[in-house]
Amino acid sequence: MHTDARTLENGSVVAGDLCIVGAGAAGIAMALEWIGAERRVLLLEGGGFDYEPRMQELYRGEIAGLPYFPLEAARLHYFGGTTGHWAGFCSTFDALDFERRDWVPHSGWPIGRADLDPFYPRAHQVLGIGPYEWEAEQWRRRDPALVPFALDPKIAWTKMWQFSAPARLGTLYREQIVGASDVHLFTHANVVEIEANEGATAIEGMRVRTFEGKELRFRAPRYVLACSTIQNARLLLASNARATAGLGNGNDLVGRYFMEHLEMPSGNLVLTRTPAPATRMYAFEFGRTKARGEMALSPEVQRERRILNATVSLEPAPLEGAAQSTFQWGTPEVVERMRTQRVVPDAAATADSMAVRAEPRTFHLMTRQEQAPNPDSRVTLSGDRDALGVPRARLDWRLTELDRRSFRDFYEVLGREMGRAGIGRMQMRDWVMERADAPWPSSLGGGWHHMGTTRMHPDPKRGVVDASCRVHGIGNLWIAGAAVYPTAGCVNPTLTLVALTLRLSDHLKSATA
Ligand SMILES: Cc1cc2nc3c(=O)[nH]c(=O)nc-3n(C[C@H](O)[C@H](O)[C@H](O)COP(=O)(O)OP(=O)(O)OC[C@H]3O[C@@H](n4cnc5c(N)ncnc54)[C@H](O)[C@@H]3O)c2cc1C
């Protein structure tokens, strides 16, 4: 079922059994699970079925701290959410990502990789990626041309990635959701406040406001917030009628520990031999490649060097200009291009140059590194309000010396191993080898990945949600999405956030059975 919330009468109250706020990757993955579950599910989406400039403008915010993409360009505000932009790069978290690492402050999830294993294959289906096979050898069996580098597994390994088409969930699942009798999608239903009871121990409703000035309320015994990392924190902080610091924020944790992936061009690799036996395994062609490898360091080496997790992809040399332009992507022209093309900026334009070449020899190294959790890296409310009266978000993105040192150590170890194995020579950019307290270079860039702000921890003094993703202290509010990540892993977040959402959905089903 679908209703445009603007057509409801002012003051309407709508009731259901479960209320999901936000219809992006997480919200849609959850709603699909409830089709046929014989519950009345309310799915509230702020936008319509297409891009609208004034809806997108609601995302505008302030940037403090390190430079970052303009917030109104970094997420999409309509049905399907940011999957209208995503590139479809997927990989799984490693077991070590979930562990407490004594060299990474605030690390450790209350769940392990094994807890997500049953949900990853289901997430593959939602996002339209290939088989649940993540070993290089499995892909080599499928295609003998996919030969990984012969690296010492005690030091380095080939971590596999898979690529979604990329699936635009708003297009892919619109008919299914609109046609479902038990999921009721409301578009143009922007939640402006999460309304709590007097003690702020339970949610009583979602207050929605339209541009036309209508106020509506949506009520259910259970609520799931799936508006994406920055927006989830913003809504909790802005909902301060019953709790002055915001909902779930009794311990001043909401908005903290904002994390990105550091995605940065870091140097070059020149292969020793031409043609190299393994370049097919690491090559990528936008829209065509189903799987490829990236190089990562073993858990043993990460432990020994006390560094963060990272992978590095190989990109044929002529990509230099595109790879360096990360922050130019945020200019108004690029935002406009993203809007009209709805593809990853530059990806389409550079698709030809990224095409798998017959015998490439020189590659640029593109690092993806997790960011260490940092309480000072945070989202707060700005003094400015949006057109619906909600305070805007203020992002203060911050990094630590561990982030910087890990970059250097990663390449010291990998470079040595590549030389030892006779694969090739790595030449790093100057900044990579600088001291950990040196400033970040102007090419500092994130991956458009927003994580943290409502981190998971069993102790309410150290996390906003518990292991089931329920907000501590509030009996009926859960959070779906990468906002709950305590650490970021080194891979793009969407596959794991969808897996976590499916886990949450199962949990809620068993709670309501
Ligand atoms: C250019 C780009 C490339 C990317 N590439 C990749 C990639 O290759 N791989 C990867 O894993 N990830 C990628 N990502 C990240 C990926 O898009 C996000 O991880 C994912 O979309 C997050 O899902 P979500 O459901 O949490 O948020 P979103 O998909 O952003 O959905 C949130 C939804 O909530 C709605 N909403 C917000 N506020 C309200 C409100 N107040 N009331 C009602 N509804 C509201 C929004 O309209 C939206 O529909 C990329 C992102 C960008 C921008």
Image (cartoon, rainbow, N blue to C red):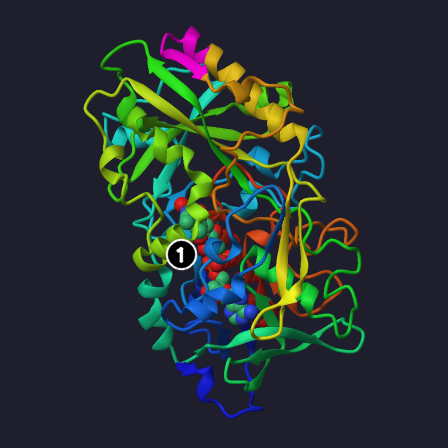
Image check: 442 left or right of 348?
right
Magenta span of residues: 417-427
Q: Nearer the viewer, residue 392 or 278?
A: 392
Residue in view at x 50 percent, y 38 percent:
445
- Quadrant of the image occupied by residue 421: top left
Name the quadrant of the N terminus.
bottom left
Question: Badge 1 local density, few (<14 within 10 Å), some, or many (20+)?
Answer: many
Image check: 63 left or right of 4?
right
- Quadrant of the image occupied by residue 237: bottom right
Residue 98 visible, this orientation: yes
Residue 120 visible, this orientation: no
In this view, 155 is above or below 110: above
Mark 1 beta carbon near ligand 1 (under 8 Å): yes
Residue in view at x 42 percent, y 33 percent:
324
Q: As shown in the figure, which amino acid type bears the numbered disc 1?
A: Thr
Where does residue 472 sit, x and y in percent of width and height? 73, 60
- Quadrant of the image occupied by residue 232: bottom right
Where does residue 197 sit, x and y in percent of width and height? 75, 78
Where does residue 320 sit, x and y in percent of width and height? 35, 29
Query: On the image, numbered disc 1 is attached to which residue?
Result: 83
Residue in view at x 52 percent, y 34 percent:
444
Q: Is residue 422 magenta?
A: yes
Q: Which of 98 and 286 is in front in this view?
A: 286
Secondary structure, mark 1, is helix
